[in-house]
Amino acid sequence: MRRWVGIVTVVLFVLAGAAAASAANYKPEYKMSIVVGPTTAWGQGGQKFADLVKERTGGKINIKVYYSGQLYAGKQTNEFMLIKQGVADFALGSTINWSTTVKELNLFSLPFLIPDYKALDAIEDGPVGKRIYRALEEKGALALGWGENGFREITNSKRAIKKPEDLDGLKVRVVGSPIFIDTFKALGANPVSMNWGEALTAFQSGTVDGQENPVTGIIIPYKLWTVHKYCTFWHYVIDPLILLASNETWKTFDRKDQEILRKAALEATAWQKAEARKGLLDSTASIDELRKNGMDVTVLTADQIKAFKARTKPVYDKWAKEIGADLVKAAEEAVARSAAPAKKPAPKKK
């Protein structure tokens, strides 16, 4: 009996030592980067992830969210390098901002590829989404879940946009991704790349006429009706978010905590995505909100969108080659399948 008691004591001592060693290797704080502020669905999604992880690890993994791009210096497109280098441990970020480093992410910025949420879900949840996850991991980041900023609609202070010619000469703020510059030049606009904080000042002073961003992610939270009279819903591109962990950070966690992190990420991103679609999916609430605050809102029809699509076709073709023709084709096939009517089951033979 004494012998067994001794063995059990040794085993417990070893396990306790291993647990202590594991905890000792963990940092007192893990940094999470988010481009926007805490009041958006995007920002709230990041905080939800941090809260879930802290609760479920008993405080062992303490993630601090750094909002409004506090961790990167200068351009939003620098954010992915922070993850790759392990300067930031986590990020809930835009595929647009990371697309200069991971070319496959430009897929979501191909003009007029993805017409609706159903098509987006088909891409993210299928083989194309898995390929994008692999591309991220090869670049130094582990993808843990899909979030969403939303379809990017255009607002401006000059005029309603109903046809491509309405963009002629408009000075439009865009993010610092080359495909956006190409797209707006093709449409006759004058694209200007600048960070969001600078853009808000430019709108107020009138030195920049317009911008393109999601409704629930930016237009409503930042009350852009105070600087822009006109808004056009055209769904020209969509802005998925991805919750990433640095590969360098990830390998320091034990398997149990990795599983906790994965589950928390999926829960937080699912919640965040639902928040981003509120008032837009099978609802006109967001459009009503914009109109209530004095915006002149135009919702383009499928026929009206054809003219914009034709004007940007050279941009689409150019970037399809950059992204990878096979990946783009797979995405196009996923979009087509999502639009196909569901097959009715064959009647049972009597």
Image (cartoon, rainbow, N blue to C red):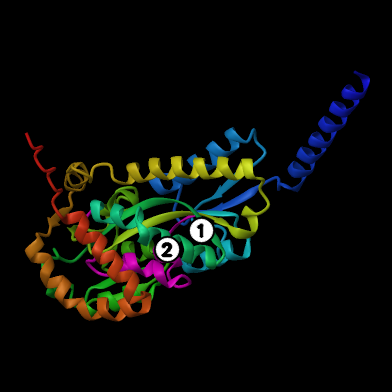
Label 2: which residue?
132
Dot 2, crowdedness within 10 Å: few (<14), some or many (≥20)? some
Is 114 covered by the magenta stretch? yes
Q: Which residues are magenta?
A: 92-116
The local secondary structure at tag 1 comes to loop
Was residue 129 drawn as part of the magenta stretch in this picture? Answer: no
Q: Amino acid at mark 2?
A: Ile
The picture places residue 288, in percent across and down from the top left corner, at 17, 43
Q: Residue at x 36, y 52 (%)?
A: 148
- Disc 1 marks a residue whose amino acid type is Gly
Q: Specify which label sits upstream in the sequence, 2 or 1.
A: 1
| Residue at (24, 51) in percent of width and height | 118
Would you say residue 196 is visible in this rendering? Answer: no
Using residue 118 as the reference point, say whether residue 194 is left or right of it. right
In whole angstroms, how far apart are the C-alphas of marks 2 and 1?
Answer: 24 Å
Residue 14: name its quadrant: top right
Rendered residue at 39%/65% (across/down): 96
Q: How many marks?
A: 2
Residue nearest the observer in this picture, 250 or 178? 250
At a point 22% along the width and 66% down the height, the residue shown is: 112
Taking the image as shown, residue 31 lies to the left or right of residue 92, namely: right
Task: Please state if 7 lies on the left or on the right of 178 as rendered.
Answer: right
Residue 181 drawn at (x, y percent):
32, 76
Q: Viewer-proximal residue, 162 or 85?
A: 85
Question: Within the image, what quadrant is residue 211 found in?
Answer: bottom left
- Picture coordinates of residue 86 (x, y %)? 63, 61
Q: Is residue 17 visible?
A: yes
Secondary structure of residue under mark 2:
helix
Q: Which residue is mark 1?
A: 69
Quadrant location, the C terminus: top left
Left or right: 292 as drawn, with respect to 50: left
Most extreme residue toward the top is 1
